[in-house]
Image (spheres, rainbow, N blue to C red):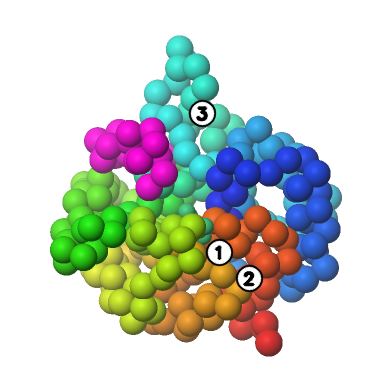
Amino acid sequence: MIIANWKCNGSKQMIFTWFEEFVKNYISKESSYIGIAPPTIYLEYVKRIISEKSLGIKLGTQDLDAASGAMTGAISAEMILDYECNFSIVGHSERRQYFDEKNSSIKEKIHKLIDVATPILCVGETFEENKNNLIEEVISKQLRVLEGLNFQNEIVIAYEPVWAIGTGKTPLKEEVNEIHKFIKDVVQSSSINSLIPHVLYGGSVNVDNCKDFFNCEFIDGALIGGASLEGTSFANIVKSFNGSYK
Ligand code: PGA
């Protein structure tokens, strides 16, 4: 599973060029789950291009709101369902940092989303927390938003160390692999139906380092920011994931 998180980047021109480049470099593999989370205002445009080019790429939102109605600017779970989005990212560290999102509101969002689309819940420690060996403690706390949930569908966790996002720094692949195993164990033991989640790594993934992560036993794919903003780079990461990039 490879997800592009375009964040607040792009324009119609950028998206047009992105798909031109992507199509030139992309080798489809029916079985792999490839998704894009564009800025919401471009969802329709991206959806149209994906359909015209028969790319089979899934669409998602970068966030949602638990409430609906008199909530200016919000996107509700009902709208995500109505628009047939496949997934939504929830609890990204930038939402936690710049929009002051707490685990309590992230929990509400997950509960709203669970029957509607696949949640991609982001967890990860800050640099300070990493240096103080608090990784497992922080992640366990963030994963508590899933407690008591009965997953009928899949759930995806993205492990994104805050200090690795957009910085060009990454943890060692062995460390990431261990943390992914930890996340799978915690979620499996805390969900009612013992579901094992897919766990993606996110944080400065690019064409050069992605294969190292993809070869690890417990890493099921990647959530990609910066390197997903160019169609060629993203297509090459997908190729690497599919084992065909030389
Ligand atoms: P990055 O972002 O790939 O630019 O580090 C990842 C993310 O924020 O999801």
Q: Under tag 2, what secondary structure? A: helix
* Dot 1 amino acid type: Ile
Left or right position of 38 against 54 = left
Numbered label attached to residue 2? 1
Q: Which residue is mark 3?
A: 75
Q: Is 111 in front, or is 151?
A: 111
Question: Which residue is most to the bottom?
Answer: 246
Give the Cα separation between the discs numbered 2 and 3: 29 Å
Q: Residue at x 67, y 82 (%)?
A: 245
Q: In the picture, which quadrant includes the C terminus?
A: bottom right
Over which residues does the magenta segment extend? Answer: 93-114
* Dot 2 amino acid type: Val
Q: Which residue is mark 2?
A: 238
Q: Please rate how many residues cluster around mark 2, counting C-alpha atoms within 10 Å: few if below 14, some from 14 to 19, many from 20.
A: many
Which mark is first along the chain, 3 or 2? 3
Does the magenta run of residues contain 100?
yes
Q: Residue at x 63, y 44 (%)?
A: 9
Q: Residue at x 46, y 47 (%)?
A: 89
Left or right position of 69 against 238 = left
Left or right position of 44 against 227 = right
Q: Under tag 1, what secondary structure? A: strand
Mark 2 sits near ligand 1, with its Cβ under 8 Å away: no
Left or right position of 1 against 171 = right
Q: Is 198 above or below relative to 121? A: below
| Rendered location of residue 197, percent (x, y) | 36, 62
Q: Under tag 3, what secondary structure? A: loop
Q: Is 143 in front, or is 39?
A: 39
Does the magenta run of residues contain 239?
no
